[in-house]
Image: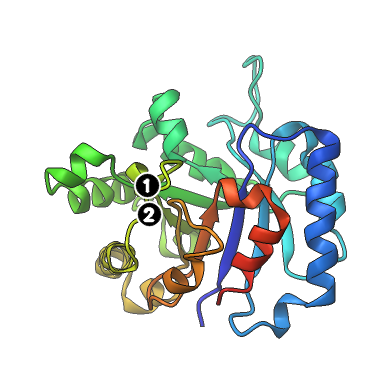
C-alpha cells in the first residue's frame, strides 16, 4: 500500500509563535484521533520557514506520523553562499523531508531541472526525503503540452537516480494555474496527470516501483475538495498551501482519506 501523505507548505507566512501554535494545535488534535486509526493511515509533514523549523520539529515530537521538513535546500553541501541553507543543516534540525522544485522556486528563482537534480542528490545524500514538485503553467496546458512538460521535469530532475534511490522520492504534481487562484484541477484532471506520471515512472523503473511511489496533488486543495481528490486511485495525498495555515481546515484535509 502506498503511503498517504498530507504536507503543509506554510511558504513565507507566520512568525515563531504563530508557527509553534499552529503545529502544536494540530498535533494535539492528531493525538486525540491518531493517524493510524484513520482509513488511509496518512502521514503529516509540516514545511515551515527555516527560521522556526527547529521549533516545529519539537512541536511534532511524540506525535506518531508527524514530521517536518524544509521548503528548499541549496544544491551544495556548504560554502560561501550567504543566506542559503544546506541539506546537512536542515537534517541537523531534525527535519525528515525537503521540498525540491516548488513552482514558486522555478518561477521566481529560475530553478531549472538540472539544478533541481543536484538538490535531489543533496537531499538523498544527507538522509532527507525529497518531495519533487512538477507541473505546468496555464499556457502550456492550453497548448496541450502539459504531459510533455511534466514528463520532461521528471525525466531530467529524477531519472538519473538508481532505482533504490528513486524509491525514496515523493512526487508532487502542481498544476501551476491552480495554485493560489482558487481554481482547482477537477478530480478527473488530477487523476489523469497522476496516472500519467505513474506510467512514466513505470516505463523507467518498472511497474512495482511505479505502484509504490506516492504522488501528491498540490493545487488549491482544501477542506471542501480534498475528499473527492483523494478518492482518485492515483492521488496519494496533497501538498497543501493556504489551507495548511488554518488548523481546522488542515485537520479536515487529513481526515479526508
Element under disc 2: loop
Element under disc 1: helix
- Whether pointer 1 and pointer 2 mark residues with C-beta atoms closer than 8 Å, the reply is yes
Residue 164 point in image, percent of width and height: 48, 65
From the viewer's perspective, tell me whether residue 205 is left or right of residue 140.
Answer: right
Q: Which residue is mark 2?
A: 184
Does 35 sit above or below residue 106?
A: below
Earlier sequence position, callout 1 versus callout 2: 1
Residue 12 point in image, percent of width and height: 63, 31
**Camera-side residue of 183 and 111:** 183
Residue count near mark 2 (Cα–Cα under 10 Å), binned few <14, some 14–19, many ≥20: many
Q: Which residue is mark 1?
A: 178
Residue 37 point in image, percent of width and height: 72, 84
All told, the count of numbered labels is 2
Does 203 sit above or below residue 94?
A: below
x 78%, y 60%: residue: 26
Amino acid at each position: 500500500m502506498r503511503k498517504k501523505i498530507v504536507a503543509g507548505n506554510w511558504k513565507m507566512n507566520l512568525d515563531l509563535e504563530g508557527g509553534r501554535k499552529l503545529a502544536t494545535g494540530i498535533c494535539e488534535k492528531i493525538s486525540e484521533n491518531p493517524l493510524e486509526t484513520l482509513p488511509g493511515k496518512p502521514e503529516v509533514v509540516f514545511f515551515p520557514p527555516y527560521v522556526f523549523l527547529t521549533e516545529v520539529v519539537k512541536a511534532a515530537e511524540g506525535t506518531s506520523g508527524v514530521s517536518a521538513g524544509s521548503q528548499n535546500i541549496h544544491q551544495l553541501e556548504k560554502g560561501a553562499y550567504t543566506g542559503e541553507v544546506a541539506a546537512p543543516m536542515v537534517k541537523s534540525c531534525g527535519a525528515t523531508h525537503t521540498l525540491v522544485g516548488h513552482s514558486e522556486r522555478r518561477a521566481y528563482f529560475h530553478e531549472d531541472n538540472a539544478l533541481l537534480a543536484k538538490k535531489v542528490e543533496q537531499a538523498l545524500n544527507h538522509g532527507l526525503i525529497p518531495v519533487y514538485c512538477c507541473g505546468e503553467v496555464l499556457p502550456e496546458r492550453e497548448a496541450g503540452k502539459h504531459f510533455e512538460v511534466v514528463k520532461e521535469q521528471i525525466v531530467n530532475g529524477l531519472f538519473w537516480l538508481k532505482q533504490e534511490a528513486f524509491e525514496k522520492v515523493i512526487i508532487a504534481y502542481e498544476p501551476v494555474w491552480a495554485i493560489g487562484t482558487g481554481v482547482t484541477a477537477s478530480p478527473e484532471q488530477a487523476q489523469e496527470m497522476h496516472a500519467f506520471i505513474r506510467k512514466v515512472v513505470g516505463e523507467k523503473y518498472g511497474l512495482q516501483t511505479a505502484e509504490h511511489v506516492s504522488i501528491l496533488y498540490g493545487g488549491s486543495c482544501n477542506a471542501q475538495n480534498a475528499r473527492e481528490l483523494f478518492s482518485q486511485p492515483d492521488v496519494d495525498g496533497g501538498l497543501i498551501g493556504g489551507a495548511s495555515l488554518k488548523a481546522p481546515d488542515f485537520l479536515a484535509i487529513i481526515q479526508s482519506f
